[in-house]
Amino acid sequence: MKRLPSSTSGTRLLKVEDTALDLAARAIQEIQQDSPAGDYFDTSVLEAVLQFDKAARNPDVGFELIPPGRSHESFTLDRRTCARVRKWLDRVPSPQPFVISGRLDEIKHGSGRFRLLVDGRSALPGRVDPASLHVEVLRPLWGKRTTLEGIVHFKVNGKPRLIEARRISERGEGDRVFEQLPVARPASQDMLPGLRRKAAAFDPVDLGGAWPGDESVDDLLRQLD
């Protein structure tokens, strides 16, 4: 069993002495960028930072963390930062259902986390949805080509952050078409904010029987009447 790396591509490696405040500082520093990738924040982090919004509305009030040693991160949280938080909240794509095929390269059995190698070079972190699967499902599939069905969460730049797997099985013959990283819909095509939560509860299995050609002969005859 292998351990997951401490960071994903594009992020700075974590140090042994790093604390939760260091991670928070990195998230706020990235939020303040003009075109962040979203490596250090997601919707929940943005919502947490926005809790400081009321105090930061006063232009004369801000929050600043200055560590005593140079080995730790610092940040400044002010009204401008909160405005950026609201901007990125509107631009983070909603979670969407996908089927993805690749090789189960690394697993962290205790927490149900894993890494899927897609198209031979791209890595997608994931975790087992405990409501749908038991973590033991990972053990016999380690190192094998697998196909996953689940909900993909995205970064603000539209790239996938991780997949919550609801079904995992060995790759079938026709699964080659799923050997690519998912792409989020553009923000202009995204669903209304009020429907975001419903998207996270969508199960790809619900599509069964909904594709053209799945209808029975009797159903087709009734449509012709």
Image (spheres, rainbow, N blue to C red):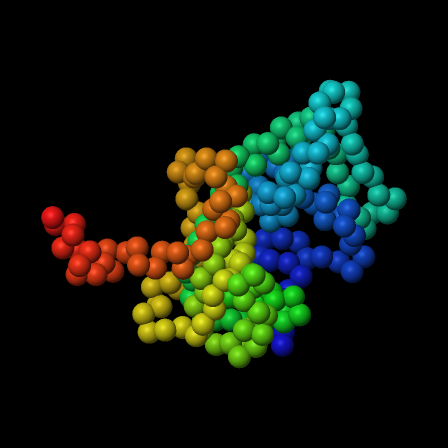
Q: Residue furthest left?
A: 225
Q: Quadrant of residue 112?
A: bottom right
Q: Is residue 121 visible?
A: no
Q: Residue furthest bottom?
A: 140
121 or 147, nearer to the observer: 147
163 or 81, nearer to the observer: 163
* In the depicted structure, whether residue 138 falls above or below residue 51: below
* Residue 183 percent location from the top left of the image: 42, 50
* In the depicted structure, whether residue 162 falls above or below residue 69: below
Kindly identify the residue that appears in the image at 41 percent across and 35 percent down: 188
Kindly identify the residue that appears in the image at 23 percent across and 58 percent down: 215
Relative to 159, 73 lies left or right? right
Relative to 22, 81 lies left or right? left
Q: Residue furthest top?
A: 59
* Residue 192 percent location from the top left of the image: 46, 35
Q: Is residue 68 visible?
A: yes
17 or 57, nearer to the observer: 57
51 or 2, nearer to the observer: 51
Number of disc labels: 0
Kindly identify the residue that appears in the image at 54 percent across and 73 percent down: 137
Q: Quadrant of residue 14?
A: bottom right
Quadrant of the snapshot with the N terminus:
bottom right
* In the depicted structure, whether residue 211 falls above or below residue 27: below
* Residue 194 percent location from the top left of the image: 50, 35
* Residue 222 percent location from the top left of the image: 16, 52
Kindly identify the residue that appears in the image at 59 percent across and 70 percent down: 135
